[in-house]
Amino acid sequence: MNHLADILIVEDNYALRESLSDYLKNEGFSLRCVDDGEELNETLSTRACDVLVLDLNLPNEDGLSISKRIRNAYPKMGIVILTARVQGIDRTQSYESGADIYLTKPVSPSELRTVILNLSRRIDHKEEQLQFIDAQTGLLPGPWMTYLNESEVDEDGYKTISFGG
């Protein structure tokens, strides 16, 4: 990864939002902050982000609903839930809504920084991997490809590959 992630924090607690914002900016991240889903929509309409840090307890639209919406609209965006909710059902629902990471408050700013860096690396790495898929076969290249004889689609629409020596 050759740049730090572009972060968008959705948090209605002003003091926490400003504290996290100051810390992450000082660490070199590009950062924007909003306090609810409506402001999030306006902000994303001008520029997407790499990682969304999202509270669950928000006014008007809750974080679970936002997470589902964002995952559908931006499938490659990293989503970190940062919430005071500690019940297992909340974790499960968050992951089902599309969250990548679930952190509970209070969180150490350095832990959040590390989570964002790791998630960003994984997102970037997936994009790099996609560039290396062989265009002809749709497979990751490797030494075994020298044994590839033919590839065809069967009557059910499945691609079959024959290997030979």
Image: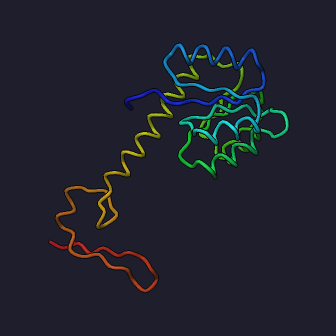
> Which residue is pictured at 78% across the width and 21% down the height?
13
Q: Residue furthest front?
A: 46
| Position above or below: 47 against 145 | above
* Quadrant that contains the C terminus: bottom left
Foreground pick, 58 / 109: 58
| Position above or below: 103 against 92 | above
Name the spot of residue 32 as percent of width and height, x first. Answer: 62, 26
> Which residue is pictured at 76% across the width and 18% down the height?
14
Name the spot of residue 11 as percent of width and height, x first. Answer: 73, 27
Q: Residue furthest left?
A: 165
Foreground pick, 21 / 43: 43
91 relative to 126 in the view: left or right: right
Name the spot of residue 36 as percent of width and height, x first. Answer: 77, 33
Q: Residue furthest right?
A: 60
* Quadrant that contains the N terminus: top left
> Which residue is pictured at 32% across the width and 79% down the height?
152
Q: How is the image coloured?
A: rainbow
Foreground pick, 25 / 84: 25
> Which residue is pictured at 73% across the width and 43% down the height?
66
| Position above or below: 143 against 165 | above
Indicate the quadrant where residue 159 lies: bottom left
Indicate the quadrant where residue 17 lies: top right
Name the spot of residue 88 as percent of width and height, x first. Answer: 74, 37
Numbered marks: total: 0
